[in-house]
Structure formats: C-alpha cells, structure tokens
Image (cartoon, coloured by chain):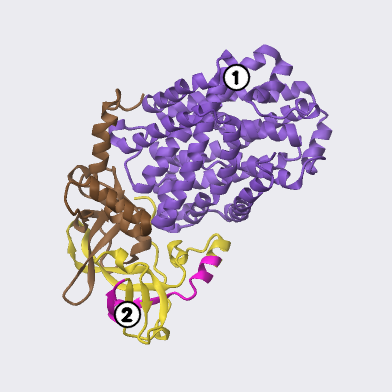
Amino acid sequence: MRKYVEVTLGVLTAIGGFVDIGDLVANAAVGARFRWSLAWVVVVGVVGIVLFAEMSGRVATLTKRATFDVVRERLGPRFALGNLIASFFVTFLTLVAEIAGIALALQLASSVNYLLLLPTCGALVWVVIWRVQFERMERIFGLLGLALIVFAVAVWRLGPDWGDVIHQASHPAVPHGEGRPTYWYYAIALFGAAMTPYEVFFFSSGAVEEKWDRADLVTSRANVLVGFPLGGFLSLAIMSGTAIVLAPRGIGVDHLSQVALPVAATLGRLGLVVVIIGFFAATFGAALETGLSAGYTVAQYFGWPWGKGTKPVEAARFHGVVLLSILLAVAVGLTTVDPIKVTEYSIVFSAVALPLTYFPILVVANDPEFMGDQVNSRLTNALGSVFLVVIVVAAVAAIPLMLATKAGM
Amino acid sequence: MRLSDLLGAEVVDRDGRSLGRVRDVRLVQDGPIQGTFGAGLRIEGLVVGRVAVASRLGYDREGVEAPWLVARIARVLSRDSRHVPWSDVVRVADRRVELACRGDELLAPTPLRHLPGAES
Amino acid sequence: MSAPAGRMLDAAFELLDRQIIDGDGNHAGKVDDLELTPLEDGSFVVTAILSGPGALGGRLGGRLGTAAASIFARLHPDEDPDPVRLSFGVVRELGPQVRLTTSRHHLDVNRFEHWVRDRFIARIPGAGHAPE
C-alpha cells in the first residue's frame, strides 16, 4: 500500500513538474499562431524526454553518477568544458525565465509590477533550496502544479469540434500566412521546451542524492513513463486553449496573461485563481530545479561535493554556485528584458545544447561495465538512435532558422 | 612524468612516419606494491590512432556494441588504431613519442574485457 | 579490496576524469591526471593521482588551461605549487568511481572548498543544518 501511494505521488509530481515557463509560453504561442498543426511536436518531445530521463535515471541509479559526471568522463575535460559552458548558459537563461515567470504570476494576482516582485521571488527560491528538504520541495510544487489541469477543463467547456481538432493535428500543414521556416522554428522551440536539459540534470542528480537503488527503478520508470506523457497532455490542453480562443481573433502571446486568457474567458474568476496558482507552482518548481541544476553541472564537472540533502557547509562551492546564479538571474531580470523573449530563447538554445548531454548518456546506458544487465533494451536503442538523429538535426537547424525568421517574427 | 605528457603526443615510427597520436595508455597491474591498492599499475603500451573520439567512447572494449549506429561509427573511426608495446618506445620528448619499430609491424589493440559489475 | 594482479586497463578511459570518493563516501575531486614514476628497467608505474586546477589546467591546454593553472597558483600560498597529489597507495578500488581509504579531511583537495565555506557559506544562517 505504501509503495502504491509512493508511485502515485511520484507520478502526480511528475505531471505537475513537467510544465514550466517554457512549456507555458511555447504551447500557448504555438496554439495561437499555428492552432493544432504543431501538436505532433509535443508528442515527439514527450517521447524524447521519456527516453532521455529514463536512461539518465537508470544510469544515475546504477552507477551513482549524475549526468555531468558521465559527460566529463566520456567526452574528456576539454570537450566537456565546452559542454559545461553551453549547458550552464542554457540552464541560467531558463532560471532567469522561471524567476521572471514567478514574478509575472504574482503580478497577475496582485497587479504589482513584476519588476518590483523579482528580488523577493529570487530570495524565496533561494530560501526553499537552502532550507526545504528535497522530496518535500518536489511534492509541494509538483502537486500544486496539477492546478494546470484547469486548462483541460476549460478546453472541455469550450467544446471545440473534436473531429476538426483531430483532423488538424493529424494532418499538419503550414497555416496560410506563415512561412515554412517559421513553422519549423516553432517546431524546434516546442521540442526544446519539452526536452530541456535541466530536467535531466535535476532528475539524475536527484536519483543520486536520494540514493536510489535497483528497487527504485520501477518507481522511477513509472514516474517518467506515466507522469511525463500526462504532463504532455497538459501542454496540449494549453495549446488547445489558445488555438480555440486566441487564434480566431488573431491575438498572439506576448504576455503570461494571454496564456491564461482561455481559462479566464470560460471559467471566470475562479478559473483565473486556479490558473495563477498553477503558473506559480510550475515556475517556482522549475526555478528550484534550474537553480539547483546550475550548481549540479559545475560541481559534477569538477568533482566538488554537491547535494541539496546535506548541510550547506559540506557542499560550500555547490551552494555558492547556486546562490550566485540566482542573484545573477534576478539582476538580469531587473534589466527589464522581456521575460517572454528570454523564455523563447532559452527553449531554442535548449534544443541546441541537447545533443551534448543526450549523446554521452545514450552511450553509457549501453555500457555493460556500468550497467550490468540493465543496459538499454533493443527497443530503447532503436528509439534512442532515431532520437539521436532528430536531436542533432534540430540542434543544427535551430540557429539558422532563428536568424532566417528573426526569431519567429 | 604525467599521463597527460603522453596523451595526445604525436607518435612517429622508425622511418619518421606519423602514426597519429597517443589516444590511451594501457596499464597492467603487476608493478611494485602501492599501499592498500596492491600491485601498482605499470605502463604496458600505448594505444595510437588518428581520431580521438573512438577510444574515448569505449567501443573498443569487448561486448560493447550498442546502439548499432554509434558503435558502427566509432569502429570506423578507430580502424587505424594500433597498439604499441612500451618496449618499442625509444624516446618521449616534447609531445613526441619515437618508436624503434615500423608502423606496419604494429597490430590493432586487443579489446579489453570490461570490469565486472556496476554495483559494488 | 583490489583486483587481481595482471589486470589490464586503459588509463585515459578507465581512470582519468572519474569521480574520487573518499573513505567517508564523500566527493573529493576528479582524477585530473596521473603521476608516472620510472622504474630501473625503463618502465613506468602510476604512483599518484593528481587532482584540482593545477592538474586539470595542463590537460585543458591553450589559453584557458594556462589561466586555470595560474589562478590556482595565485590562490595557493606556496611560491610554485604542485597540483594536489594523492598517493596511489590510498586507492581502495577502481570502478565507476575511484574510492580511497582515507578521509578527504586528511587530503589537500579541499582548500578552495574550505575557502568558499569559511568566507561565505558558513556565515549564512542555517548553513550548518541539513534542510528539513
């Protein structure tokens, strides 16, 4: 019975924790502009993150090595340092976006300008990392994140012509007035939003910190295999909401309030309250994960002591990196950069950096020296190889498409 | 000497022909006792090749063959890798390793068996 | 426990860049380089693990590596410091991690860690307690 509760809680946490500011913005923006013609990317992205997270979770569980430890060992110090710089930059950019996202969510609730709220939000994120235990932190924000289910309720209430929705989703075509490069640029953004590297840094480091062993593999697989697809379902609900409400009126998404619009329009004040809670939990949870991931990557590259579970004095450099990253992220946020733009760049750069960590994990997950009988199955390898190609193509195409479309203008 | 003095050094055979660079250093545990570790690790030979990635990924070991696509590429890239017994090394200086033998006398490195067991 | 004598391994692949775990199970740096000592018969034996920026800098090469090594030299109190050296005699086991018999408190790998701890982290309230 306890095990059952444990698995259920884990799955619920994974659903709530799946969506972050990147998913909120990307899915809403794509729904408003492309309706359901890019829905297939969410499905591809979810399969990708399930594969990637399952492999890195398994590697971490069996070898007690988190992702960046593996990266350093397989790629050597020079290449891994380049990788560290790229991955850290992307994670940092995401951290800026998440902290700004928390502030934007609070702005929706209080009408206080988000810039005034930013420093407090950064401080809160740091205090939770500093003082709240790992599992409790995960549970609280993951479960609160389930509030985003309100998007699915709103879509159901809006009652679109499902036949038409399914037709659009299954016969993807570039909508009139949109260029092919723009379509593919948003496809990559959506893909990057689903497969952000920090999720894997965090997940694998958590597995090491929580001292998972073979017995926990079942639980971790359940979290990933059930939780992430259901998280993807929330993404599709967000996309559907803007596809139904915003797209016909020609409204784009350049503020978080527009993401909430479909819910507010159908479910009124109560819906809006729930959606704001969901925004807050999703961005706050992701800010914790990205803040910690900034520390994880650096500490694991250099072999420093790291960990959220121990006393901070026993992982001083790790906590130093986390603290500095949060301070710097708040500072960047305060320069009045557009948080939505930062989010869009962070997910596109996520797609660019992805092969750097995906590839070494795929290789090590096949190494019998480390994995024993738990090496990848044939199915995992077949899918894993297809995704390797997809990920590399997306990474290579991302920057040229960004330049060609002026970042999707 | 440090291991990094050898790694990446250019390897030149008796006739002055380059065989690539030192990609790895093969050790055998039969040296003088080193405290709790037991018999020390002694240099047995060098793994030499033109492409760096190949040996680093670990596909030159026994039983590592998946995923097929990656293994295949790694194998192709490590085609020209050779094993140099330490006894054939004449001189190591200035990131250059000089050999007493000819390049075409060298054999491909024998794949090592992987260490047993992930969990200890 | 050490493996049977005669075992073969590739140093760069199976030793370098691996995580060092000390006798208490704590992270204690990476295997950044190895010290090789000549024997009378012309062969070389691994006598120490070199760890930290002083050793890593040399392997990174280029401007970046030089910078890393010079920062290390500047932070270090000695005039011309050697990189942190862990005698191979304290190695207990090679595997996914390199495990040592001694505690990291007896090793010199933690200078920078202690500096960050004493100057900054330990001064923040709650630094001495695990999160709840």
Badge 1: chain ID = A
Q: Is residue A5 visible?
A: no
State the residue lying farthest toward the front: A335
Q: Nearer the viewer, residue A369 or A24?
A: A24
The residue under label 2 is which amino acid type? Glu
Identify the hue of chain B. yellow
Which chain's colour is purple? Answer: A
Q: Residue at x 25, y 46 (%)?
A: C22
Span colored in magenta = B73-94
Q: Position of residue A398 (x, y in %)?
A: 62, 48
Front in this rendered view, residue C115 or C19: C115
* Total labels drawn: 2
Left or right for A61, reference A400: left
Q: Nearer the viewer, mark 2 or mark 1?
A: 2
Write down the residue under mark 2: B98
Q: A398 or A360, which is in the foreground?
A: A398
Q: In the rendered structure, are the residues bearing label 2 and label 1 in contact, judged by CB atoms less than 8 Å apart?
A: no
SS for dot 1: helix
Residue A162 in which image quadrant: top right
Q: Is residue A268 above or below residue A195?
A: above
Question: Which amino acid, mark 1?
Answer: Ile
Chain C appears what colour? Answer: brown
| Distance in Å between CA atoms under marks 2 and 1 | 69 Å
